[in-house]
Amino acid sequence: MQAGADDLSGVADESVDVVTTRSVLIYVADKQAAFAEFFRVLRPGGRLSIFEPINSFAAAQAGGELFGLEVAAIADLAAKVHEAFLDVAGEQDPMLNFDERDLLRWARGAGFVALELDYRAEVGVPEPLPSSDWEVLKRTAPNPLAPTLEEALAQTLTASERDRFEEHARAVLASGTPARRTLATAYLLAIRP
């Protein structure tokens, strides 16, 4: 069965033991309805297990990095490119319009009990980039709904600015400077009474 998290009408009331999701609610506009559906389909004593990235955290931390790539030396250009991704998202984007406290509030509001939330934030943690090849890296997107880095560059920078950005990116990649991961995640467990 294929269904949206906020409409599980094909699943009978109190018919499942566990509802688990991983990076699902970031695509759901009505998260409160999703929690109501999770509660409805769970049997009494059923468990809810949710893992979600808290993308609003990383968006608020933007500084000298852009998707992990060090860009402090071209901060003026990086700020323009970063805006392209925020413009796509907007304030009500399901990927950005919630945090860990909202997850707790929605679960409690749906009727869940014994809530446990593990929150993890990482700022500037070194990690290898997915590729050291700029031609590959610029064709990646942070999520399926966002533009690639190459598309964002084309939307926001002039040709000479793009050249300057790409020259810097290639130099950073050639230097072996590690990427810096900045992210936050939440893992929520709850029980239907």
Image (spheres, rainbow, N blue to C red):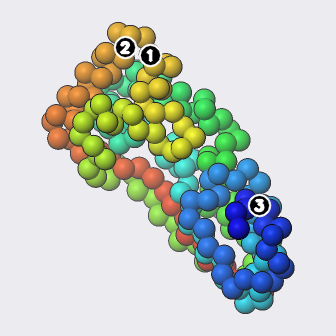
- Label 3: element kind: loop
Tell me the kind of residue under disc 3: Asp
* Residues marked 1 and 2 touching at CB (< 8 Å): yes
- Location of residue 101 in the rendering, given as x and y in whole percent from the top left corner: 66, 62
The residue where tag 1 is placed is 157
Q: Which residue is mark 3?
A: 6
Screen quadrant of the N terminus: bottom right
Taking the spot 35% from the left edge, 42% from the top edge, the residue there is 68
Q: Is residue 142 left or right of residue 131?
A: right
The residue closer to the viewer here, 166 or 118, is 166
Q: Residues within 10 Å of mark 1 (few under 14, many from 20)?
A: some
Residue 90 versus residue 157 in the image, above or below: below
Q: Amino acid at mark 1?
A: Leu
Quarter holding the C terminus is: bottom right
Three-letter amino acid code at disc 2?
A: Glu
Residue pictured at 31% horizontal, 15% vertical: 163
Q: Secondary structure at mark 2?
A: helix
